Amino acid sequence: MYKGEEETPFYQQLKDKIIDDIESGKLKHGDKLPSERELAEQYGISRMTARHTLSILEREGVVERRVGAGTFISNYKIEMDFITFNSFTRTMLGRGLTPSTQVLSIKRSPVKPGIANKLHISVGEEIVIIKRLRNVNGIPISIEESFIPYKFCPGIDLRITNNHSLYQMLESEYGITLVKAKEYMKVKLAEESDSKLLRIRSESPCVLREAVAYDDKGQSIEFSTSLTRSDIVRFYSELHLK
């Protein structure tokens, strides 16, 4: 490899080369990369530089290292629109993907001040808390918690099970149609318990979304949080400027 006039570091040149090969279709999801030693020999760089390049690509979700097997391209991305409000199940089915949901826990509890304020209800009022693991094509992608005033959906804690759409149940069983949401997003490092569920390394960067969903009467119905893997999920929006 050659340092040009801008003195681009060798690791950056190798990284750019791998990214270019992915974007051109030369490398595809699941393809195995050469070993550190082979990369070093092929591009005339040190093994430390090759290792550093692969570590950066791994952190960015471009490659996946498998113990005893090697390094593989993992640029499989699931696109999620963060502008259009819709249910997870409908969104994934609309993209030709297979969604599944695992209920991790359901409980009823007096609401704490922070969530009470978001839902515009009194502190101590009973809510139902539903924690679920979202999967796409068998891959865990997010952990979601929903907080709903129990008065709006009595008995839902006894009805909802794996692969039930919460929003469809609210609509069909309780006559509640959610039509809009206010969402906020930020980066958060996954804690150990979340990492195990999502099958990622501890403290991996994830996207934390917080949202309040409203029905067609403007009533706040649900406060939710979702911790989503950033390595295989890509959020996008489409803006019309004129």
Image (cartoon, grey):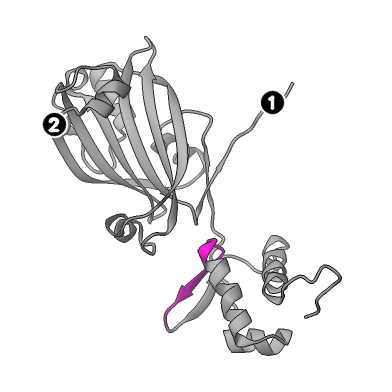
User: Which residue is tagged 1?
Assistant: 240
Q: Residue furthest right?
A: 5
User: Which residue is tagged 2?
Assistant: 109
Q: Seen in the image, is 5 located left or right of residue 58?
A: right
Q: Quadrant of residue 20?
A: bottom right
Q: Which residues are magenta?
A: 59-67
Q: Position of residue 30 (x, y in %)?
A: 54, 69
Q: Residue at x 52, y 29 (%)?
A: 84
Q: Residue at x 80, y 76 (%)?
A: 3
- Quadrant of the drawing holding the C terminus: top right
Vertical placement of residue 126 versus 233, above or below: above
Task: Say if the magenta span includes residue 54.
Answer: no
Vertical placement of residue 122 versus 17, above or below: above
Vertical placement of residue 98 versus 29, above or below: above
Q: Residues within 10 Å of mark 1 (few under 14, many from 20)?
A: few
* Comes first in the chain, label 1 or label 2: 2
The Cα atoms of the two marked residues, 1 and 2, are separated by 43 Å
Q: Which amino acid type is marked by label 1?
A: His
Q: Seen in the image, is 213 located left or right of residue 157?
A: right
- Quadrant of the drawing holding the N terminus: bottom right
Q: Which mark is on residue 108?
A: none
Q: Are marks 1 and 2 in contact (CB under 8 Å)?
A: no
